[in-house]
Image: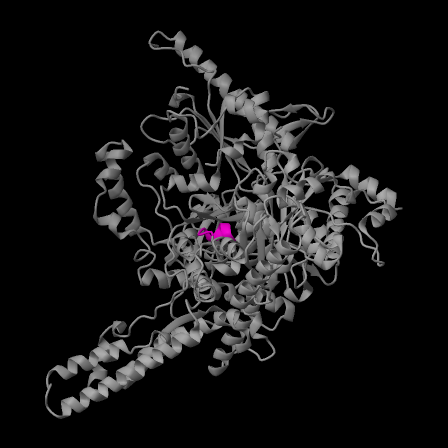
């Protein structure tokens, strides 16, 4: 079969709260998802099998996905139908409008052959995935279809090594999934019962006078950050990239950024000047004892250092879990390189300092290096053994004359994976929805490939039924 | 005729329970073969390994380890005994993990080799009760681990060395049949190593005056240790010496004395002033060459109290040496129980069994099984199989009645197996010439090494070395899956392969109908 046109590819990424949808991929670059719609549907109270896309008389609101898992499969299928139907009708209207205008040239796009990719979660059971496949082929009459698991999509977005650790933080759950040899090891991955909402609980303990709404506003405000002593220590020794502010940005000019951003160069330069100016005027949030934010009524509220501590407990819990999970992967060389490639996704990860804070905790909990106490003692011993005249001089030398301790255990390095720089739209948008970028990359590769080996075609479906999805291990 | 079937495959191993569908390459979930239960509320269970770890963690959590007890599903021989626990675990698996309707899937249970037929029958019946009465599975098949491993690798002869959590088990398979007389085992496996490592590190820390771990409940503490830092130690530090450690030590000692002697001679020569100048360089060379690799230090970071522990190579190799020479750790262990001893015993016993059968009953058509039972004098004492799947053994009355009478007495339908004669004839048909040499060589060229504990660095080389000393005139070929994950899942993966055979007739399936008929006829 001939490869598909990029314009026709449909990607759906259903999450607990919202579903990201995009119809048609851009030729040159990957853009952020076109639509974000709430993952909910309305079910008729009187008729079990009747669903509506919007609130009607005597309907119940149903959320088919909770904590990443499908909790109501029939409702989810109806939701998919609504999404697919709306995309198709919108596309048809667009075409009509375009054809009507006089400037339209070229052929009408074909709406009968739309390849669909659904980004799945590791907690979706085999049966659920088979049922969705069946629904797509038999009910929605799709002809070409593919699931890609969000954790795998994430690694494709980062064009990373075969081994990595995915930490996906949702509202009420956190998934820790090891990827080894490009395979998501779902059977050793963990689903924790804590997520972004755990931050609210912590904050409520720290700030008992605040109500739930104010806490949510504080969490989403720009003065809410993760700052702790471990991070400061790592900043000092350069693991977290020098001192906190992006010094390099100030001096040097990233020409590539300006060119790819597609904006007027003068405008960008003017903005830089302005930012520099403001920076000198304002003291950084982290240097302030107190800072303020506005609640929903526009009232100014002052908050102390608690605004840096809201994530601490969650971070500690996640870090411990990552350790548990990675101990269950046997191959030490692969585990070693997975620790080199930690990917943190989910909305919570976009909190200022969160990733760095989690990295600092992971390093503190799991990095195999000589304990500080022992190292100091060893240095002292070396110093003591030196003759007196050398001792004074040694004080001014750095401690590198003491050989470093070598361990065979892993991990000896813990690093975050490097995020792609070459998708300007995504760079601006942030990377908390990075599985979607991965899905775009995979969809482009798979559906424009000259052979139809990596997705389910109608023929394959007719031949072996819904379980054919397991023959295509992506 | 070919069927499209997708079964649920379960393997309750001695360490972990692996469950998944037969149409996928990886299992859906891997749980410990143990669980936690709340002391105050007997209905609150934890099966997820990570939740259990959170409970056991000395870190402050909402969950407190003192409120829980740890239970196992299998006994020290790796056989299931805690049926209540297994039922609860399965409930959890089908509802939370697989999320499927059990009445829609065939069930395949991968079980270890059970030599005692009465025991095998009891376990199979227990499983059927659970699968048919509780979970409404339509049909069920039992697959024997070593046979599945052999057949799924396309072999009919093999010597399976399974080094698991509860010990090592050597199972010879010849012409697609397990030679029961040749099975040997010991109790020195992963769990034993946990104990050895724990004692060793405890002693090391004692020397440094450091307190060990937390004070929580003993069973939970042991469980926690073996699933955290001991596991880390096993993965990253443990190594098996490629030859007998004692011999290696003697070799290095001899080298050392030899070089020391040479050095002395050189000194004397130097003293006479003949080779001045060249001596210092030569001396430093000697020091390098006598540097015994066994005395080289390695560092281990003991995370619970953030201490570096220094171990030398000899100490590390010594820990796994106990697998081969258990007598070294305590006099109460017999040296015959060492891994290499039980391997060679298995080979010799297999050869003896098969060749004696050969001589005594040339006229027998049905081969080893029948012959073997001839020696044990009871037809019911053999494991009958179709491919890798087991046929339920007949129930034995206390009086030594023959099978047929027994059968009639119990009216158990499971005994009348139409497949039986057919399969045995097929299996035993090409058994005309079986010299011990032939048996030795077909086993030794098909040595399969499996089990999670076999993943320790150097294990395969050592087994080769030990076998080549004991059977120097034979060619040796070993098979050990180089993908570590696949090797730890091997029993399950073999079960998947065997349940995906092209026709149903290649395995023995039991239906719920058969089960209910047999049950009702009993009552």
Q: Residue at x 59, y 60 (%)?
A: B352
Please tell me which residue lies in front, B472 or B5.
Answer: B472
| Numbered label tally | 0
Image location (x, y in percent) of residue A444: 38, 29
Of A421 and B4, nearer the camera is: B4
Question: Magenta stretch: residue B485 in it?
Answer: yes
Examine the image and state in which quarter residue A98 appears.
top left
Q: Is residue B225 above or below residue A79?
A: below
Q: Is residue A286 visible?
A: yes
Q: Which residues are magenta?
A: B481-487
Horizontally, residue A430 falls left or right of residue B93, namely left
* Left or right, residue A321 beside residue B378: left
Tell me the quarter of the image containing the C terminus of chain A: top left
Q: Is residue A174 above or below residue A60?
A: below
Name the image quarter holding the N terminus of chain A: top left
- Out of B303 and A28, give the one closest to the viewer: B303
Q: Is residue B194 magenta?
A: no
| Residue drawn at point x = 52 percent, y = 61 percent | B453
Left or right of B306 in this view: A76? right
Q: Give percent across and percent down for residue B8.
A: 63, 41
**Quadrant in which residue B72 is drawn:** bottom right
- A321 above or below B284? above
Residue A185: x, y in percent? 50, 47
Give the image location of residue B322, x and y in percent. Answer: 51, 72
């Amino acid at each position: 079969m001939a490869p598909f046109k990029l314009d026709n590819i449909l990607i759906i990424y259903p999450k607990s709260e919202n579903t990201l949808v995009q119809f048609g991929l851009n030729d040159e670059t990957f853009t952020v998802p076109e639509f974000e719609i709430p993952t909910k549907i309305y079910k008729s109270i009187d008729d079990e099998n009747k669903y509506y896309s919007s609130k009607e008389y005597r309907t119940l609101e149903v959320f088919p996905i909770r904590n990443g898992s499908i909790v109501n499969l029939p409702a989810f299928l109806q939701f998919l139908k609504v999404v697919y139907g709306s995309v198709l009708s919108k596309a048809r209207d667009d075409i009509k409008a375009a054809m009507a205008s006089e400037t339209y040239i070229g052929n009408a796009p074909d709406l009968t052959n739309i390849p669909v990719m659904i980004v799945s979660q590791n907690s979706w059971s085999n049966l659920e995935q088979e049922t969705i496949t069946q629904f797509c082929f038999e009910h929605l009459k799709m002809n070409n279809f593919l699931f890609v698991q969000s954790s795998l999509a994430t690694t494709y977005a980062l064009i990373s090594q075969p081994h990595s650790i995915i930490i996906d933080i949702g509202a009420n759950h956190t998934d820790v999934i090891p990827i080894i040899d490009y395979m998501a090891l779902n059977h050793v991955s963990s689903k924790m019962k804590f997520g972004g909402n755990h931050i609210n609980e912590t904050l409520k303990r720290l700030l008992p006078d605040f109500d739930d709404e104010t806490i949510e506003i504080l969490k989403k405000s720009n003065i809410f950050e993760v700052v702790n002593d471990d991070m400061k220590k790592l900043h000092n020794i350069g693991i977290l990239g020098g001192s906190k502010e992006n010094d390099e940005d100030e001096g040097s000019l990233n020409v590539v950024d300006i060119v790819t951003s597609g904006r007027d160069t003068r405008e960008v330069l003017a903005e830089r000047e302005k930012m520099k100016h403001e920076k000198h005027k304002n003291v950084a949030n982290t240097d302030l004892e107190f800072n303020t934010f506005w609640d929903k009524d526009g009232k100014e509220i002052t908050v102390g250092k608690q605004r840096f501590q809201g994530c601490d407990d969650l971070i500690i819990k996640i870090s411990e879990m990552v350790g548990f999970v990675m101990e269950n992967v046997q191959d030490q060389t692969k585990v070693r390189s997975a620790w080199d490639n930690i990917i943190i996704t989910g909305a919570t990860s976009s909190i200022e300092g969160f990733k760095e804070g989690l990295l600092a905790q992971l390093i503190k909990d799991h990095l195999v290096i000589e304990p500080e106490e022992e190292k100091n003692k060893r240095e002292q011993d070396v110093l003591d053994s030196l003759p007196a005249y050398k001792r004074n001089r040694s004080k001014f030398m750095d401690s590198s004359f003491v050989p470093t301790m070598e361990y065979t255990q892993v991990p000896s390095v813990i690093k975050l994976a490097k995020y792609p720089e070459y998708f300007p739209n995504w760079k601006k948008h942030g990377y908390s929805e990075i599985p979607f970028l991965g899905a775009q990359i995979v969809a482009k590769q798979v559906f424009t490939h000259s052979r139809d080996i990596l997705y389910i075609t109608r023929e394959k479906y007719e031949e072996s039924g819904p379980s054919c999805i397991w023959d295509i291990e992506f | 005729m070919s069927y499209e079937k997708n079964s649920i495959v379960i393997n309750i191993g001695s360490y972990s329970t692996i469950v998944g569908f037969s149409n996928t390459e990886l299992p859906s979930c891997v749980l410990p073969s143990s669980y936690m239960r709340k002391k105050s509320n007997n209905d609150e269970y934890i099966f997820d390994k990570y939740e259990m770890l959170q409970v056991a963690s000395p870190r402050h959590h909402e969950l407190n380890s003192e409120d829980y007890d740890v239970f196992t599903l299998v006994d020290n021989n790796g056989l299931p005994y805690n049926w209540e626990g297994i039922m609860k675990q399965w409930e959890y698996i089908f509802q939370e993990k697989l999320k499927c309707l059990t009445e829609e899937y065939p069930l395949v249970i991968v079980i270890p080799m059970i030599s005692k037929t009465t025991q095998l029958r009891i376990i199979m019946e227990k499983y059927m009760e659970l699968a048919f009465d509780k979970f409404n599975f339509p049909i069920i098949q039992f697959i024997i681990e070593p046979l599945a491993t052999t057949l799924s690798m396309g072999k009919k002869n093999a010597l399976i060395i399974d080094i698991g959590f509860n010990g090592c088990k050597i199972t010879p398979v010849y012409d697609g049949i397990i030679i029961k007389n040749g099975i040997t085992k010991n109790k020195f496996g992963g769990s034993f190593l946990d104990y050895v490592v724990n004692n060793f590190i405890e002693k090391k820390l004692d020397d440094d005056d450091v307190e060990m771990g937390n004070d929580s409940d003993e069973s939970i503490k042991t469980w926690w240790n073996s699933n955290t830092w001991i596991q880390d130690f096993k993965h990253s530090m443990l190594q098996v010496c490629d030859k007998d450690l004692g011999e290696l030590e003697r070799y290095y000692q001899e080298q050392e004395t030899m070089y020391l002697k040479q050095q002395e001679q050189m000194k004397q020569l130097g003293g006479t002033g003949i080779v001045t100048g060249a001596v210092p360089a030569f001396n430093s060379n000697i020091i390098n060459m006598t540097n015994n690799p066994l005395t080289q230090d390695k560092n281990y970071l003991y995370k619970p109290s953030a201490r570096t522990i220094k171990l030398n190579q000899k100490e590390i190799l010594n820990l796994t040496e106990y697998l081969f020479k258990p007598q070294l750790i305590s006099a109460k262990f017999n040296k015959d129980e060492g891994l290499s001893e039980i391997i060679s015993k298995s080979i010799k016993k297999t050869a003896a069994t098969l060749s004696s059968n050969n001589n005594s009953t040339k006229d027998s058509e049905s081969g080893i099984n029948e012959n073997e039972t001839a020696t044990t004098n009871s037809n019911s004492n053999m494991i009958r199989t179709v491919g890798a799947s087991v046929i339920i053994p007949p129930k034995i009355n206390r009086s030594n009645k023959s099978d047929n009478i027994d059968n009639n007495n119990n009216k158990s339908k499971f005994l009348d197996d139409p497949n039986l004669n057919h399969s045995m004839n097929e299996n035993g048909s090409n058994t005309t010439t079986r010299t011990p040499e032939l048996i030795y060589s077909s086993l030794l060229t098909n040595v399969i090494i499996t089990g999670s504990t076999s993943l320790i660095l150097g294990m395969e080389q050592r087994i080769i070395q030990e076998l080549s000393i004991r059977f120097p005139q034979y060619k040796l070929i070993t098979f050990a899956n180089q993908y570590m994950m696949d090797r730890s899942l091997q029993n399950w993966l073999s079960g998947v392969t065997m349940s995906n055979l092209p026709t149903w007739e290649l395995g023995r399936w039991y239906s719920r109908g058969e089960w209910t008929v047999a049950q009702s006829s009993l009552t």
